Image (cartoon, grey):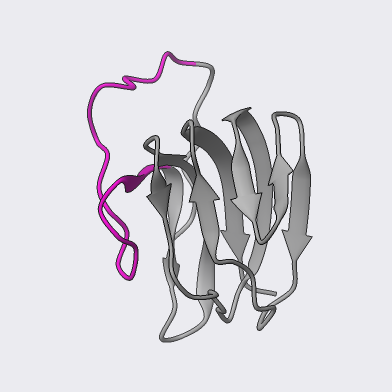
Amino acid sequence: MLKPHLEFHELDMSSGWETPPGYPPGIEQKILAGGLDEESKKGSRTRLLRFQPGAFTTKPFEHDYWEEVFQISGTLTIGEETFRPWTYAVRPPHTPHGPFRSDEGCLLYEIHYFD
């Protein structure tokens, strides 16, 4: 589960995307490095998460790991508040968050890890 040593390299943004478990179609992740073993509560991962225009979730999320989120592009709406690029969140384990909506689509950079 260790992250490899990776120097600067160009990402292929046209492939490697998949819908994460528990997410609806239109929301996709691309794992950049690492992995989480949620059963044994070990590891860390870095990923991109993208919402296609109009994509949304219907219920809050809650998980056992820390999460840091940086919004790179687009808009992300949580409740009645819409966030734009260059916004950041850090969430401790078991913090309810969402549901989410993105009318124009968005791209998020996320880091997930256990203590």
Q: In the picture provided, is 8 more to the left or to the right than 19?
A: right
Residue under the image location 65 percent in, 61 percent down? 67
Q: In the picture provided, is 73 more to the left or to the right than 11?
A: right
Where residue 30 appears, x then y in whole percent? 36, 41
Name the quarter where the N terminus is drawn.
bottom left
Name the quarter where the C terminus is drawn.
bottom right
* Location of residue 62 by image quarter: bottom right
Looking at the picture, tell me which residue is in the foreground, 28 or 60. 60
Where residue 36 appears, x then y in whole percent? 45, 66
Looking at the picture, tell me which residue is in the foreground, 47 or 7. 47
Instruction: Specify whether residue 105 is painted magenta.
Output: no
Is residue 45 something that shows in the picture?
Answer: no
Looking at the picture, tell me which residue is in the foreground, 66 or 6. 66
Residue under the image location 42 percent in, 41 percent down? 51
Is residue 40 something that shows in the picture?
Answer: yes
- Region of the chain picked out in magenta, as a range: 9-31
Q: In the picture provided, is 54 more to the left or to the right than 8?
A: left
Is most of the magenta stretch helix, strand or loop?
Answer: loop
